Amino acid sequence: MILAGDIGGTRTRLAAFETEGTKLKCVVEKTYPSQERSGLAEVVAEFVKTEGIPVHSACFGVAGPVRGGRSKISNLPWTIDSRELAAQLKLPSVGLINDLEAYAYGVDALESKDLVTLRAGADDAEGNRAVISARTGLGVAGLYWDGFRHHPFACEGGHTDFAPRNDLEVELFRYILKKFGHVSSERVLSGPGIKNIYDFLRDTRKAEEPAWLKEQMDKTHDAPALISQVAQEKKTPICEQTFSIFVSLYGAKTGDCALTFMSTGGIFICGIIAARNLSKMQDPA
């Protein structure tokens, strides 16, 4: 059985797969709240014990750079060591790669039913590709063509500087700079980034926060999800404006990635925020 994991700052997803010819079949999948666990080893131990799965190989995609088989997870107080995991699972080795690099490896496994085209371009099957995903943080990866196939590679493009394009974004930049001392793309393009945009609109009085929404915001443990839900329901302008700015910035960053990687083979937008707000992502405005 193959054990695979997607390790993020908010959620850790583990799944066991078995092979069926040239394809993989998911046998079981579980999601764990990352912040409630001491580390990946604890989650893996619980998963293997509960499911009673014999593990023959394992690989984990982690939200952070991987060096020498180790990774300090972004937005989470975990350090993951592939050698320690291999010893725990009694395996010769365990794969540890960047989460967006893992997403990039999955591109060729996608079928048409898995994709929604936001903007069609000229077909270039041998062109470079890029992958971008806003979740708890912002991740980016590329795929280059060697003449025979695409090869994924990791990068830390989500931590590049945020470049405002208009007066409103300059004000947003200054607001976040005052708060954090530095403004990376991730400060606006992530779950926490959605909250930063919302706070900016509220605190600068560019949009009003209704009393009922303030009450819900004070109670919720997932402000970005609440903002998303209210925006989709069109209950109040502040949430709609937040997502309008967020999607515009997402489009700009995606365009930057297309230029950086010269991704004429396509750019793939992944992650739960895009999936849950597909109608907003498809809005031509």
Image (tube, rainbow, N blue to C red):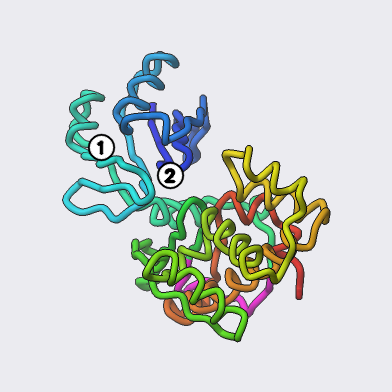
Residue annotated with mark 2: 8
Give the magenta range.
Answer: 119-130
Secondary structure under the numbered disc 1 in the rendered image: loop
Q: Quadrant of the C terminus?
A: bottom right
Query: Magenta-highlighted stretch: main secondary structure?
Result: loop
Q: Residue at x 61, y 50 (%)?
A: 224
Judging depth in this view, the residue of 208 and 19 nearest the camera is 208
Is 204 on the left or on the right of 180, as rendered?
A: right
**In this view, 168 is above or below 6:** below
Q: Residue at x 63, y 38 (%)?
A: 219
Residue annotated with mark 1: 94
Tell me, yes or no, whether the highlighted magenta stretch contains residue 11.
no
Tell me, yes or no, whether the highlighted magenta stretch contains residue 129.
yes
Residue 184: x, y in percent?
42, 69
**In this view, 232 is above or below 55:** below
Is 20 on the left or on the right of 198, as rendered?
A: left
Q: Report if residue 127 is visible in the image.
A: no
Q: Residue at x 52, y 31 (%)?
A: 26
Q: Report if residue 91 is visible in the image.
A: yes
Residue type of the residue flagged with mark 1: Val
Q: Earlier in the sequence, mark 2 or mark 1?
A: 2
Residue 183: x, y in percent?
42, 71
Residue type of the residue flagged with mark 2: Gly
